[in-house]
Structures are given as C-alpha cells and as structure tokens.
C-alpha cells in the first residue's frame, strides 16, 4: 500500500470514528428528550387530574406543604448543628491557645530556673531575678531584699522603678514586709499599685530549708498588666525557692572564695 493510500485509509478511519461519536451523541439526545417528554407528560397528567378532581389537587397541595415543612425543619436542624460545630471549633481553638500558653509558661519557668542556677556570682544572680520579675511577672516598681546582720534586718540590695535609697529597710517579724517574710509564704494583696513603699502589693519570701534569707517586694505593675495570673503565682513559688537557693549558693561561694584567698595569702606569707 502506497503512502497516499495509507493517508486516505487513516482519514477514512478518523471520519468514521467522528461519525460514530456524532451518532452516539444524537442517540443520547434522543433518549434524554424522551425521558423529559415522559416527565412532562406525567406532570401534565397530574395537573389535569388535579384540575378535574379538586380532592387530588388538595392532596397534592398538602403533600407539597408537608414536604416544604419537612425541608424547613431539616434546614433548621442543619443550622443548629452548624452553630454547635462552630461553637465546638471555637472552644477547641480557645483550648489550643490555652495549651500553647501553658507550654510557653512552662518553658519560661524552666528557662528562668536554669538561668538562676547558671552562675555563682551574686550580682549576676540578683540581675537575673530583676529580669524575671520585670519580663515574666510584669512588675514596674519592686525591690529585692536580703536578710543581713544579727538583728535580722531586711535590706534592699537591688530595685527597679525607684531609687534604691527610696526603699526602707525592714525588720523580720515587724511591719507588713517583715511579717510576710517571717510567715515564709508568698502574700498577694488585692491591689495593682501602692505608692507607700512600706506597703507592697506582693511579698515573695526567699526561703532556704525553712530559713528566710530575703524577699522580693512588688509595689506596682506595668500598665499593660491588669492583675496576677496562675503563672504569676507559680513564678512566686519558683522564685521563693530557686532564687533563694541561687542567692544562698552565690553567697557561700563568695565567702569561700574570700576565705580561700585569705588562707592562700597567709600561706604565701609563711612560705616566703
């Protein structure tokens, strides 16, 4: 077979295939037309029957009204279910936010605890405490007190929001601060600000083995802070123990370093 014959045969096959598709499409149109004609005839028959017999018309009307009422009831049910699903989604989203916040809070507690025990330098420990109270608790005016001397006097060693000299010393067991520290329990008064530096709004005793060594006294909160949360109370408990331990360890280390230097100096004198 020549190339020309091959092309003619291919074109004939393509034409035949196209013709068959057109014929099949025509048959489908005819079937669909017949189906629609039957449906139209059925509806027409029902209308004519209803027109001849008012009882049939009334029956058809009741059926349609009942169907409409059923559809409206189903629509109401679907809307109620949709509202319930939206409420559940909102609750899930709120719970997700709460879980994320709890995870973030736990991470902050862990980081804060780690930072407190990452150094044995007393000044650095106190600086870390200040950062925790500012950034996590949201305090604006506060001071860190340490118990010094045989008379058990609470002396401010670091402060924010006011000059350190503005904060009065206190005696353990006396006054608002002294009594709160002696009780060895974090105390939170129901207020957001106190201009009286003898009356803090929060007192966090720093306690090591039932022995108070100082306190954190908060007098006012930052403007964006409208109260204390559960995390704040967790931070109070964490600071009361971990900050106290960090301060106690740093003071012991400082004392041991001084004693070691003294002994080393004495040994150097003897060996010269």
Image (tube, grey):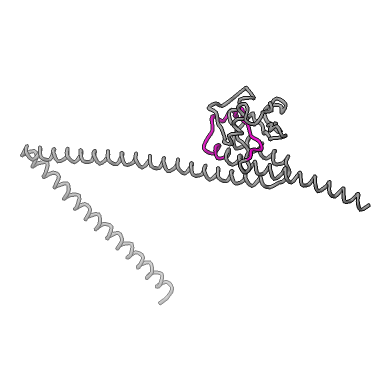
Residue 216 picture location, percent across and down: 63, 34
Q: Which residues are magenta?
A: 211-234
Residue at the far right: name it.
Answer: 272
Residue at the far bottom: name it.
Answer: 1
Left or right, residue 16 beside residue 224: left
Residue at x-position 8% and y-position 38%: 51
Residue at the far top: name it.
Answer: 195
Residue at the far front: name it.
Answer: 150
Whether 220 is among the magenta residues is yes
Left or right, residue 52 beside residue 165: left
Whether 35 is among the magenta residues is no
Q: Where does the N terminus fall, quadrant-wise?
A: bottom left
Residue 121 picture location, percent across and down: 73, 43
Residue 244 picture location, percent across and down: 65, 41
Nearer to me, 255 or 70: 255
Nearer to me, 29 or 182: 182
Figure quadrant of residue 53: top left
Q: Compared with residue 22, is residue 176 higher up or lower down, i.e. above or below?
A: above
Figure quadrant of residue 161: top right
Nearer to me, 97 or 117: 117
Q: How many labels were placed on the picture?
A: 0
Residue at x-position 61% and y-position 34%: 182
Residue 115 picture location, percent across and down: 66, 45
Residue at x-position 58% and y-position 25%: 193
Left or right, residue 178 beside residue 23: right
Figure quadrant of residue 58: top left
Residue at x-position 17% and y-position 49%: 37
């Amino acid at each position: 077979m020549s190339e020309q014959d091959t092309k003619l045969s291919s074109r004939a096959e393509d034409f035949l295939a196209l013709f068959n598709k057109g014929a099949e499409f025509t048959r489908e149109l005819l079937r669909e037309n017949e189906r629609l004609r039957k449906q139209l005839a059925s509806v027409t028959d029902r209308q004519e029957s209803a027109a001849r017999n008012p009882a049939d018309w009334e029956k058809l009307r009741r059926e349609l009204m009942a169907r409409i009422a059923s559809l409206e009831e189903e629509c109401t049910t679907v809307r109620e279910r949709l509202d319930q699903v939206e409420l559940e989604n909102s609750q899930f989203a709120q719970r997700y936010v709460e879980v994320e916040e709890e995870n973030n809070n736990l991470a902050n507690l862990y980081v804060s605890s780690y930072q407190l025990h990452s150094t044995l330098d007393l000044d650095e420990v106190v600086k870390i405490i200040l950062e925790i109270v500012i950034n996590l608790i949201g305090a604006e005016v506060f001071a860190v007190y340490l118990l010094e001397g045989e008379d058990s006097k609470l002396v401010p060693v670091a402060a924010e929001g006011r000059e350190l000299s503005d904060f009065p010393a206190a005696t353990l067991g006396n006054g608002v601060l002294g009594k709160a520290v002696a009780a060895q329990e974090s105390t939170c008064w129901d207020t957001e600000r106190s201009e009286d530096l003898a009356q803090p709004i929060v007192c966090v005793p720093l306690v090591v083995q039932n022995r108070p060594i100082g306190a954190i006294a908060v007098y006012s909160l930052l403007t964006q802070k409208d109260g204390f949360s559960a995390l704040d109370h967790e931070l109070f408990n964490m600071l009361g123990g971990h900050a106290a331990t960090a301060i106690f360890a740093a003071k012991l280390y400082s004392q041991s370093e001084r004693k070691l230097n003294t002994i080393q100096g004495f040994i150097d004198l003897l060996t010269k």
